[in-house]
Amino acid sequence: MKKSTKRKALILCGGGISGAYYEVGVLRAIEEFIEPGMSINDFDLYIGTSAGASIAAFLTQGIRAERLYSALEDENDPYFPVKREKVYRFDLLGWAKTILKLKDIRRKHWYAYTNLIKNIDISEEVSNLINILPSGIFTLEPYEKFLTGTFEKLNLSNSFSDLKRKLLITANDIDTAERVVFGEEPYNNIPISKAIIASSAIPVFFKPVRINGRDFVDGGTANVAHLGLAVRYNCRSVIIVNPIVPIINDGRNVCFFTDGISCANISEMGMFHIYNQSIRMATTYRLRQAIRKHSLKYSDLRISLFEPQDSQLKMFIYNPLSFENCREILRISYEDTINFLEKNRKNLYKTLGIRKG
């Protein structure tokens, strides 16, 4: 195979823990199809957002997708021994502050029950409760420590300036609504591990990550793939891996069981599932708009997009925090991408400028 001299970018979107496992499965399949024409570590630019930031950080430093796959597949593999307690924990300090603030509210409700306060406004009290909740359920501080230790153990750098390949990690300033790009000035001196957790701080689930007095949340909150960054770096061959697509609850490929017999509507599954589906719909729309916008503007732009197909969506209806479920997602995404590329490899080769001969 011969390869093109066009600059190439690999864009890895978010999707939480399950999204990271999905991406590694897809990348392993891509790796098998593009070799020996090129390597998954040969891209000129890597853009990582949220879960994709972690994967991009390893690929940029020469770690093969196949090695990441085997490490995630085997929970006893010492190479990347990720465990739930090493990724997140309850924000104990935040919740402790909330409990202290609850004293006044609890006192008022006690008075109400004993008829000492008869005109209590329940809606106002609920509003007060919302205002004292912590900034996130969990904190990603354990994950930062895990990443720092893993980089050191594997003799990988935790500094953007040491990388031979360009790595960009995106996040959003929650106060100014401004996107920041770690790996570019003035944020290229931030440790990679710190940039990763800032990009991964999904609102509500994780508390914002404070860096130099500013609070950052998930890089996919506003922009999804940050395709404009790839264009700005003059990349015209782009691979995008996006795990976040709407779950089509049609009762065929996907069925939410509530009673173990019949399928339920998403609205019957509770707030988390409604929130999750809303994020998936918004993400898909924004990504399609970005691809359309840049494709119309740059006629030489070639994009291959990898996303879960309808038959794969059932993978994402189970507990996203279960590593057992994530390993199933890893396996299915790899096998399904292999089957997809068996029929569509020419499109991938065209995007990357790989020619047989």
Image: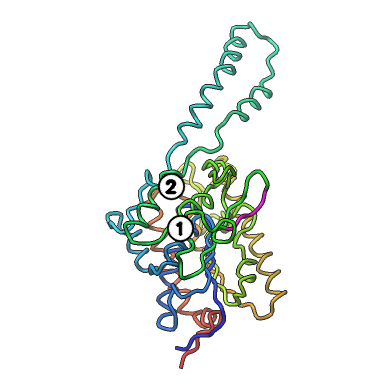
Residue 353 in the magenta stretch? The answer is no
What amino acid is at disc 1?
Ser
Q: Are marks 1 and 2 in contact (CB under 8 Å)?
A: no
Q: Quadrant of residue 233?
A: bottom right
Asked whether, in this view, residue 153 is left or right of residue 97, the answer is left
Asked whether, in this view, residue 295 is left or right of residue 150, the answer is right
Q: Residue at x 41, y 67 (%)?
A: 61
**Residue range corresponding to the magenta coloring:** 177-181
Which secondary structure, mark 2? loop
Q: Residue at x 50, y 88 (%)?
A: 355
Disc 1 designates what residue?
54
Quadrant of the image containing the N terminus: bottom left
What amino acid is at disc 2?
Leu
Q: Position of residue 165 (x, y in %)?
A: 48, 70
Q: Main secondary structure of the magenta part?
A: strand
Relative to the observer, which residue lies in front, 161 or 75? Answer: 161
Disc 2 designates what residue?
321
N-terminal label among 1 and 2: 1
Q: Residue at x 61, y 55 (%)?
A: 180
Q: Residue at x 72, y 74 (%)?
A: 297
Q: Residues within 10 Å of mark 1 (few under 14, many from 20)?
A: many
* Residue 136 vertical placement versus 50 (above, below): above
Q: Position of residue 206 (x, y in %)?
A: 51, 42
Which secondary structure, mark 1? helix
* Residue 342 vertical placement versus 113 (above, below): below
Relative to the observer, which residue lies in front, 188 or 204? Answer: 188
Residue 179 in the magenta stretch? The answer is yes
Q: Position of residue 349 (x, y in %)?
A: 51, 82
Q: Position of residue 177 (x, y in %)?
A: 67, 48
